[in-house]
Image: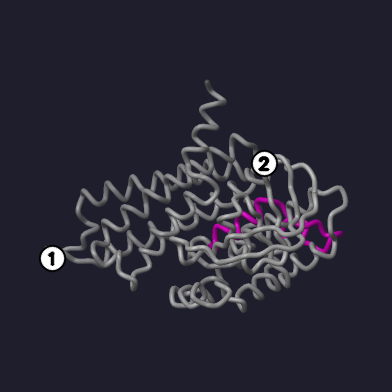
Amino acid sequence: MSEERELLRDTVAALVDKHASPESVREAMSSPRGYDESLWQLLCEQVGAAALVVPEELGGAGGELADAAVVLEELGRALVPTPLLGTTLAELALLSADEPDGDALEKLSNGSWLGAVAFDPGYVVNGDIADVVIASDGENLTRWLSFTADPAISMDPTRRLARVEATQTAAIGVDSGLLDTAAVLLAAEQIGAASKCLDLTVQYTKDRVQFGRPIGSFQALKHRMSDLYVAVQSARAVVDEAVADPSPTTAALARLAASEAFSSVAAEAVQMHGGIAITWESDIQLYFKRAHGSAQLLGPPRDYLRRLESEVF
């Protein structure tokens, strides 16, 4: 990773550490818009988070997909509710047009507008608070100039979903793989969350004492946590490759690996924390819900597995 990207990671991590404590995350997810507007402003002003993938000549930072992945991974670690994923994908969709909408891109880049992409109109991330909504049917991209949106019930309270329906649309152009890009970015976020969930579990097993010793000292738990560490790091390697060289194949592999790793870590975290893990006061139940919600968000992992199988057989 380049020095500039490491600095980006450190800056975002510092903001998250200062402004996105577990208490702050709970407050944000329960707010009317589902995210911390002051933290979003800081991310846009101090980090340029919403401007990373937009070229400089269109008001952006001229960064790469990997820059957005770094930011989403750090936000994912703390389950920070933000409109970054949808906004980034909306920007990439607008940029694919022969003549991109410079005004919309500028407003999305500075964070004053929010974006959303409808791969499934029934479950659109931040769809009810978005200013720009793009729809993808796998072949073409369409901008919804006017639309109606209603909040959708979500298993994951840290990820706001909505049912969105278009009333007026305009064609943007051919979809050159926006779903694959979304899969890569979501996989990066999943890796961040899985890593933090494992960290919290390891720390708990050091603090929790049974039979006069920390439960983390028992060999059976050591083996389980070692297996989880290997799973997360293996998935991270797959995701890193997809970020560096995105393609339909690497995106599917990243999505599959990240979903399986995060779901496994979250399930084991519940077991190792015991009954407290499923109480509202525990953060582990939020990671568990994020793991399973994210795994289904862009289509279940089995869909990506079938895509990979079709390339082999």
Question: Farthest residue in the top direction?
Answer: 313
Return the x and y of residue 290 as percentages of the image width and height: 45, 59
Q: Which colour scheme is used?
A: one colour
When the figure is inspected, residue 218 is found, relative to residue 80, above or below; the finding is above
Q: In this view, does 174 lie above or below 101?
A: above
Instruction: In this rendered view, identify the residue nearer to me: 126 or 215.
Output: 126
Which of the two discs, 1 and 2, sits closer to the camera? 2
Residue appearing at x 80%, y 64% in the figure: 104
* Residue stretch rendered in magenta on the structure: 52-75
Front residue of 235/307: it is 307
Q: Which residue is drawn at 70% across and 58% down?
A: 166
Q: Name the residue under label 2.
A: 138
> Pointer 1: what residue?
212
Q: Which amino acid does label 1 sit on?
A: Gly
Q: What element carries label 1?
A: loop
Disc 1 vs disc 2: Cβ atoms closer than 8 Å? no
The answer to whether residue 98 is visible is: yes
Q: Which of marks 1 and 2 is nearer the N terminus?
A: 2
Identify the element where label 2 is drawn: loop
- Image point (68%, 47%), residue name: 136
Amino acid on which the number 2 mark rests in the picture: Gly
Query: In the orientation shown, which residue stands out farthest toward the front?
Result: 167
Q: Is residue 134 above or below residue 25?
A: above
The circle on residue 153 is none
Crowding around mark 1 (Cα neighbors within 10 Å: few <14, some 14 to 19, many 20+) is few
Residue 165 belongs to magenta span? no
